[in-house]
Image (cartoon, grey):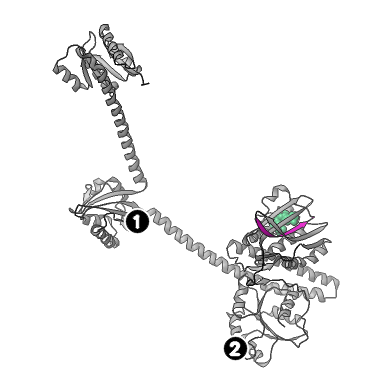
Amino acid sequence: MDKKIKILLAEDNINDVKLLEKEFKKGKLNYEILTVDNENDYIKALNEYNPDIILSDYSMPVFDGLSALKIRIEKSPLTPFIIVTGSINENTAVECLKAGADDYVIKEHINRINPSIKSALRTWDLNIEKEKAQKALVESEARLSNALNIAHLGPWEYDVLNDLFTFNDLFYAIFRTTVEKEGGYTMSSAEYVKRFLHPDDTEVVGVQTKKAIETNDPNYNHRLEHRIIYRDNREVGYITVNIYIIKDENGKTIRTYGVNQDITEQKRVEEELIIAKNKAEEMNRLKSSFLANMSHELRTPMVGILGFSEILSNDLENEELKHFASSIFKSGKRLLNTLNLILDLSRIEANKQDVLLMNTNIGSVTRNIVSEYSILARNKKLYLNFDVKEEDIYSIIDERVFRSIIGNLVDNAIKYTNEGGVIIVVEKVFEDNKDWAVIKIKDTGIGIPDDYLQTIFEEFRQVSEGWSRSFEGTGLGLTIAKRFTDLLNGIIKIDSKINCGSTFTVMLPLVKEMHSSEVEKEVIINSEEKIVSNKTLNFLLIDDDKDVYDLISNLFKNYNFSYADSEEKAIEILKKQKLSLILLDIHLGLGVSGIDILKKIREIPGCKKTPVIAVTAYAMINDKERFINAGCDDYISKPFDKKELYNLINKYI
Ligand code: ADP
């Protein structure tokens, strides 16, 4: 059903009211009506009744139609108004319409009232819609102008035929000027160039504008960036210009138009970012070279500390001195361990941790790592058991990285266990639709409280922190284990109960079958304490570090051992005698590189195949490949222990 029409009727004659209502009913008008016959009631009704339409008699004893019309214009200008009168001549009708009435109906033709009401209401609806649309248009224009302003956009138009630019306030705002200062919204292209363009960019702007005008492409759109001069302080700014064209029916460009955008701030930020990026790259480069140097500088003295203390702790007779020497050795080892942890972490942080991936037998490499901790466990009277469930468990790993993960976890397991011991299990597991090589390190130690389990892999986190901490350590081991496991696409998990022990589980993607093309890396467990050979052996050490010389000459005291601290001396020795193996320092001081010496060695007849082992304190992960690619047979990093060196030598003699 239609909405009820609210009619306000200004009429004093009750018969006329009846007449009208009869007509409404005839026309089946859905309505309600309020009748008034004086000005006060009329105004009150306009305010409170809120009519949809006003009908008014032309003349009444105390009120009249024209006054009613006037009041309607003031109070409710959009409400339709129809004069209903008995006597009206042509002039009165025109007068009413001029005054703003929408229609007039003469009582003799009262049957016109219903169509007149309907038509007036339709017009009213349209007016309302129109007003709404107009309001929306004004609002959206304001919004657009606001948006252009915020985005520093300034539209313009160029009349090609008359060489005339037309601008607006937004355009001028970009150049920090006003229409008053520029003397109007239009100017010639020469004037525009003179006032606004940076002199060095006028040519490029000219060329691009010409191109736009001469193009045959009706959809031409070109974006151009150039410098401008701000009008207020003559500083240099940057804008982008989007140029579009309008052609006439003959295809001739008659108009170009476009939008300028101020991008000075954006440019400034970009420039700052470039400077910051260059600086960050430079810092990163410095950091890497600092790391490499640190590694070299800290490892070199460790050769003497660890090497000599190890010899002394074996050879000294006096028990007290022996104990001192082994304390120096243990402290040195601990220092080296911390150094390695810090270097590993810095390399991960600097994204410098390159990996050398190889298909590796996880069981045998883990067994090898674990064997290095047997003395540590024995000293604490703990068992250290190893259980490989299957022999063919392979994964693609970087052995050094893997060693660091398992080493840290086994070291912790022993450190945080006082009774019982540690068991390491290697097995295959199918989980989350994948096959995994799994290494479990289970201890019967102190366990980790629940609230620490979430954060324990974060840097420097330790259950006992601060001055009261009861265990030694940096708080980096687990962080490194986690980051390195990520690097090998693996997962590390922890399960722990306070006072019952912890289980750390490392899961690495399992390689199902070995392909013949893949290099298999089997770890040979070799723990000889001496050089094993029945040949007469001649060794040469090329190194300028006196400590290294003292240490190695002691280790080789039962063999023929020569020493050269310079290239010349080395060549001299090599020309005179045939050597079984050469130990070559890579960094000989004063800018002499072992790699250059190696090239010369290889040129000496009889030295082409002599095994050369690089001995260096550069221990970054890709250094090994660098030395081997340069022609060395193998590599050992300083500081090394006796066993490590003997094992390596045994491989080549
Ligand atoms: P830290 O050098 O302190 O051992 P880690 O990062 O290796 O550093 O370990 C962080 C902390 O996690 C340790 O300080 C210790 O509180 C706890 N934690 C690690 N492993 C174990 C474990 N097997 N048993 C009990 N607590 C452990």
Residue 205 location (% of width, % of height): 28, 59
Q: Amino acid at mark 2?
A: Glu
With respect to residue 317, does 415 lie above or below?
above
Q: Say which element carries label 1.
A: strand
Q: Amino acid at mark 1?
A: Tyr
Mark found first going from the N terminus, 1 or 2:
1
Chief secondary structure of the magenta span?
strand
* Residue 390 lies in the magenta stretch: no
Give the alpha-carbon distance from disc 1 to disc 2, as whole Å. 63 Å
Q: Say which element carries label 2.
A: helix
**Can residue 464 be seen at all in this image of the molecule?**
no
With respect to residue 515, does 171 lie above or below?
above
With respect to residue 142, does 97 lie above or below?
above
Relative to residue 236, is residue 322 drawn left or right? right
In magenta, the rendered stretch is 432-444
Residue 46 location (% of width, % of height): 32, 17
Judging depth in this view, the residue of 60 and 577 nearest the camera is 60
Residue sitting at x 69%, y 90%: 578
| Residue beneath disc 1 | 238
| Residue beneath disc 2 | 603
